[in-house]
Amino acid sequence: MSDWSIQRVEQLAPDAASFKAAQGSAKPGKWANLGHDARLVWGECQGSGANPYQVRADLVDVTYKCSCPSRKLPCKHTLALLLLLASGSVKEGAPPEFVNEWSANRAKRSEARQAKAAAGDQEVDKEAQAKRIEKRETRISDGLAQLETWLTDIVAEGLAATRAQGDGFWEKMAARLVDSQAPGLARRVRELSWASTSREWQTELLAGVARLQLLIDGYRALDRLSAPLAAEVRTLIGWTQDQEQLRQREGMRDHWQVLARRQTNDETLTTQMTWLHGANTRQFALVLEFAVGSQPLPVTYSVGQVLDAELVFFDGEPPIRALEKARHGSEPRRVQLPEGGDITALQSSFATMLARNPYLERLPFVLAGVRPVLASDGRLLLRDEAGRSVPVAPTCKHQWELIALSGGRPLRLFGEWNGRVFDPYCVQQDADLFVLARLDDVSFLSKVA
Amino acid sequence: MAELNAWDRLLGVATLGTRRTPVNEVTLWPAAELAAAGTDAAAELQFLRAAAAQRLYDIAGARSAVQASSEEHAVVDVDRTRFVSELAALRLLRMIRGEHADLIQEWSTLALAARRQLPPQFVPLALAHLKPGDVPGLGDLLGPTGQWLVRMNSDWNVSFSVDAPDHDRWLSGTLLDRRAELLAMREQHPERAREWLQETWAKDPPDEREAFLRSLATGLSLADEPFLETALDDKRKPVRQAAVQLLASLPDSQLSLRHRARLDTLVSAEEKKGLLAKLGKPKLKLAIVLPETNEKATQRDGVEAKPPAHRKIGERTFWLAQMVALVPLSYWTTRFACEPAMFVAAVMDTDYAGELLPALTDAAGRYPQRDWLLALTDAWLATKDIHLRTQAIAEMMLTAPNDVREAVLVAQLAKLDSLRDLQVILSLLQSVQFAYGAELTRLAIAHLRTIAVKQASQYQQPRNVFDRIGYHCDVSTASESLPAVLDAVDAQSPWRNAVEQLNDIVEFRAAMRREIL
């Protein structure tokens, strides 16, 4: 309930101007009928119009509504209301009529959606669907054949000659694979274009093309793979798993702790990744949320939050990606990372997973008891008690912050390991947990409250 | 040469292409039994499969070796109870990113006054963005973590304050270390510090000599005079100038006495004539003779021969003005048995007022006495160029004790009319660079209120016109009075935005105070 901090409200703001405006409106004098209960918070804010704006928010699902005409989501009044809540200026009470009406409507809509989903199964034209799938399979198999010929040519002509071809060379093949409805393969071909400009372009390119061949071989032999691995290969090629169907499955209920969040942007799509860890199952889960264009992302999770929730995992080896099927409530926040392993444990877990899934790219891991140290070439290493070390990803901008935080003492870090470098997302020292945060070009460690 | 590993052999083939390099299929595979897989396929495909297998073998089999740590790893001793709060550190981050960056210095002063340090994870940010010259006491703010980090990155140059001055560090440290050592010693034992300086003086390069000499301003006394006199003969001008400044700050120094002797003959009181002089209030009239030459000895005492190109001033007037700047102000009031105001009025009546007023102002920087500052600010406010005069006043106030400059400014502001003297008031308040006391803050805000309520300009005023006032006013006084000003200034006033911004700054500073602990 009171896990709303000012920082969390700031994260929710669609832009800095909204947050600033909200701070101006977050004065109890401008509000009437303020109140909250276990799930909802509400109030009426005097704006420039004749009638006060009615603002209400659901703190568990993080949805909100305000009667103001602003098109920003959430608007400054919603943010101001949450700021008042965060600063303890809102007293507990019973929701007034305009709040009850809103939650009743939401409940009705949600029921309607579930009913539609349940009914949807019967409506689908099974025959048409089978036809569509068959058509796509044909296209993919054509695409794979073209890709194989293309790879054969690259090996025959040599990487040096291929690299000299320029960007268009990769883009052309990627576009063909998009036409073949294999977007996952297209993305990997585009990655080769970046690999060809990297410092270790020979290794990156050869590893990349060999991987593509391994994917082609894997897809052609799907029926000989275990079910989870086959699902993994299909996902890599570009098939999606039907989320409505996944939701019908029994999920895994646990106390899920939010360990880290990270956003990536490409031209049109913002992806929000959230890593969770189950207290009892000791399972890592990755929830993806998407926003198109300038749409704001939902702020469903905040680091340190612990949710009593049921997650359903997508098929995969190991299953990592998940969606939240049902949320039963919030637990007290937790700002400690789960117990971790040392470097030997990190490398052997990765090897074990690779034996089950040769396509594995990254493994979430809590690395414990490591000190950040600078190597003579300026790279940052994490060294464990035994004296083993692994390099930190060169994309990590928090080298000095990690060194300073440690002060020569061991840290515990959560991040992802790709077999070569460790990419940290958050770090714990003694009783404090920090996320690796950035504001424009300034890197800092933000303490999780 | 070390034998190529399997992956390197594969890279060799792949780089040139299988068309140009012969491929031995069997040796490509990480394990012989794998080579059987798909032997019916084209050579290129087999090559790709072998490469994929080799890559997996390499990654899955990679294990970091134990490396003995070459050096004993130091652990920084930090005291968590001394950290500023997380919110305070985040506010510093906001300022570093440009929001009210002018308040960084105040923030660090507050933190240091509370004996607080930055939490370690914020230290690299401060090292990368704050300059030691802009933030006094930066070293103390960064604490032991800062001291530990600067040794790892030569881009970072910060001096850390010295608890116990150390002679070895004075002799062999870097320039920054040596300055810190000398200053620390000077604060504890001024005599010992001067002896340290004399010890290495002959070998110190000129830039360092100048820097070291300036640190003698702390704990300066007549005991330093013999050494400073020798510095007057130094080869480098900045060193000589530093010595002149220090000697001029000692009212009984020989240098000061020599200038007084020169001025004894150049400036004198004119005979009072006529009935008016006898009946009216006492008045001083000055007779001024310009020096004929600028002797070697006078030049040694800091009087430069040629005026800077941009100053429109005759050579002889320039010599006189420099002498006036270098004697204590009490010399004049004693000699002519008058109050500062009377003497300044007499100076303003001479033909050299334009040159002598800045010279007296310069001297007032060294001898900041209340009556003198009042008389000189009066004289400045009566001159024409608003910008120049408020600048001069602001500079003169810099070295004055807080209570003196507060009293002087309060007296001056009380005399001004909010509307008629609007430009002067704003210019003065924008120029002064020190913290206002409660009285000055009340007066300044009262002026602003009248201006913002009554001054009906048809142009929108710049939003930042009150910013400087916001940065320097007394926070608790301003917090009390600003809400009423906001209520009084309606939304249509051309000053409304500026008043709001002023209020934002005061709120920002109030939050800064709440958060430090």
Image: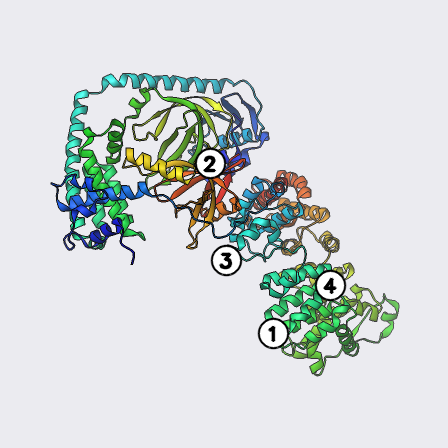
Question: Which of the two marks, 1 or 3, is nearer to us in this view?
Answer: 3
**Residue A394 pos. (x, y %):** 39, 48
Q: Which residue is mark 4?
A: B190
Q: Which residue is mark 1?
A: B308
Residue in the picture at 36% in, 32% down: A288
Mark nearer the N terminus (3 vs 4): 3
Q: Which residue is mark 2?
A: A11
- Return the chain for callout 2: A
Question: Which of the two marks, 1 or 4, is nearer to us in this view?
Answer: 4
- Return the chain for callout 4: B
Other residues around mark 1 within 10 Å, as few (<14) / some (14–19) / many (≥20): few
SS for dot 1: loop
Q: Are marks 2 and 4 on the same chain?
A: no
Of residues A310 and B145, which is closer to you in this image?
A: B145
Q: Are marks 1 and 4 on the same chain?
A: yes
Question: Which of the two marks, 1 or 2, is nearer to us in this view?
Answer: 2
Other residues around mark 4 within 10 Å, as few (<14) / some (14–19) / many (≥20): many
Residue in the picture at 60% in, 41% down: B80
For the residues labelled 1 and 4, the Cα–Cα distance comes to: 35 Å
Q: Amino acid at mark 2?
A: Gln
In the rendered image, the quadrant that contains the N terminus of chain B is bottom left
Q: Compared to B324, does A95 lie above or below?
A: above
SS for dot 4: helix
Q: Is residue B170 left or right of residue A167?
A: right
- Return the chain for callout 3: B
Q: Pointer 1 and pointer 2: residues touching (CB < 8 Å)?
A: no
Other residues around mark 3 within 10 Å, as few (<14) / some (14–19) / many (≥20): few
Q: Is residue B457 left or right of residue A214?
A: right
Q: Is residue B155 left or right of residue A190?
A: right
Q: Amino acid at mark 3?
A: Asp
**Residue A189 pos. (x, y %):** 24, 44
